[in-house]
Structure formats: C-alpha cells, structure tokens
Image (cartoon, rainbow, N blue to C red):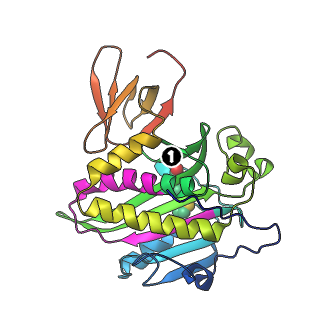
Amino acid sequence: MKIMSPSVDQTSPDTLSADAIKQSLRTRWIGQPAIHSLDVVESTNAEANRLAQDGAPEGTLIVANAQTKGRGRLGRTWVSPPVSGLYLSIVLRPAHPPDWFPKLMLTAGVAVASAIQQIGTTPQLKWPNDILIGDRKVGGILTEAVFNKTRIDFAVLGIGINVNTKQDELPVSIRNLATSLRLGLGKRVSRIDLLQILLHQVEQWYESLDTGAFPTILETWSEFDTTLGRVVEVFLPERRVVGIAEALHQDGTLLVRDKRDCLHRIVAGDVVHCHLDP
Ligand code: BTN
C-alpha cells in the first residue's frame, strides 16, 4: 500500500474550503453533487440530516471547521474545537433493507482506519467503530439513518478525527482517554490531504459493501481489531454483560461469552475494555 505523508508546514492555513477540497479529490461521487463547507455549525450530522430530508443526493458532503454541539454515540458530545480536527458528514442513500445498516458502521470504521494507515500510523478499531491509537481514542463515527418499512430512506455517516489537537487542548475529562494524529505521529498532519484520502477510502469501502464484499470488510476489520480476545463490559439499555469478546458474527455483531458460558450477541452498546477476569 502506498504510504503518503500529508504533513504541513507550521504556517499553512490548511483551510477546508469547498474549492480546496475539490482540488485533487479522487472520488467519483462523494463530494461531487455538493460540498457544504462551514466555518462553525452545531453538528455536521444534524446539517446532513436536514439536507437529506430536503432531498440532497447521495454523496453530499458537509464539512465544518468547528462544531458547537458535535454529537457522539449514545447521546454523548463530540468535542469539536476549531482548526485542530476534522468533522464531516456524508449523505448516503443505500438501496438496502434496514438490517443492512449495522454493516455500514463496521465498514466506516475500516475506511477511517485505512485512511489513517495511509498517513503513516496504524490505528486500532474498538468494536463497533471507535478509532484508537495506543488505547486512546483518536476518532469516532456516528451513523444515523431514517428507515421506512422495507428500506433505508437515507443514512448519514458522520466522522470526527482529532487531527492536530495538542495534549493541553483535549478536555481534562478525556485527556487520559483521547489522543490526536499529531500526538501519535509526532508531527502535524494536513487536514485537507487527510480528508481527500478519507473520502476516497469511504467511497471504495462503501462500494465493496454495496457489491456484497462484507466478508472481506470483516477480515480487514479484524486486522485493525483491538477488542477480540479481551475481557469486555458491555452496557446495554437494560443490562450489563461481562465476558470475553470471542468473535464477530458474520453480520458484524459482537459475540461475548460470559463466565457461565452463555454467548451474547451484541448488536449495539457501549463496550469497555477491561483489565479484569470475566
Ligand atoms: C463517537 O461517539 O465516537 C462518534 C463521534 C462522531 C463525531 C462526528 S464529528 C462529525 C459528525 N457530526 C457530529 O455531530 N458527529 C459526527
């Protein structure tokens, strides 16, 4: 695989204007119908949902320099300071039934991990799609969708990456749990180069998923995996499961075996890696 080094000099403005993004964008359809580049927005996912409801075509891209109400999974907040991070959402219109949707989450994780690998560091994936460097979170993915009875009406794929964030810019509450590409690589990274690599990867992996290559996606996911074989604590709406993360099911759900030898199939939930016996 070709390794690129999108480092920037310290004075580079590294702007994310639509024109700058379009230049040397290698995608066929992501970002091609429209790029909405915003300085500040509450949440690019909220914006993408609004545009999709109004009929925005597949591939519509929303990028922001900062978010004031960045959304994380499970109702959490995604801290989104200006300039140092990448915050984007893509409108998707998959022609698939609702039960296809979980596969998109894992596919997106593989795309983001592959993009980060191309800039020179190999991240790990924590199920379902947290992106880690050295056990600290560097990026997150929020997939949202509107369904009707038989198919997905539209989906929004939201990606947040801490790119050039310095240690003291991370909120104190997550300082020991989070990191950035800059901290991992020891040098600044061009957000625009990373964005172009990322959009290309999302397009490639999404097309693989669309043409039925989910087994290959699961194999690639496993190459980045840091969850399988570990003791995990899974917080579900009504209960908690503690056990060994044994395998991924062929549909992408996580199989956790508890100490009574009972196998739990986890569709969604908050997974914590433990350093304890199950
Ligand atoms: C997570 O909790 O790990 C998911 C975080 C996803 C954050 C991104 S930033 C761009 C997009 N817009 C949002 O409001 N959230 C996602």
In this rendered view, identify the residue nearer to me: 187 or 267: 187
Tell me the residue at 23%/69% (across/down).
95
Left/right of residue 151 with respect to residue 164 in the rendered view: left
Residue 93 visible somewhere in the drawing: yes
Q: Where is residue 55 shown, x and y percent of the image?
A: 35, 82
- Rendering quarter of residue 23: bottom right
Left/right of residue 156 with respect to residue 150 in the rendered view: right
Tell me the residue at 69%/76% (across/down).
15
Kindly state the secondary structure of the residue where label 1 is placed.
strand
In this rendered view, identify the residue nearer to me: 124 or 18: 124
Q: Which residue is mark 1?
A: 130
Tell me the residue at 43%/52% (across/down).
110
Q: Which residues are magenta?
A: 86-111
Q: Among all residues in the image, which is located at the extreme front? A: 2
Q: Where is residue 260 shown, x and y percent of the image?
A: 31, 13
Relative to 60, does residue 226 appear above or below in the rendering?
A: above
* Label 1 within 8 A of ligand 1 by Cβ: yes
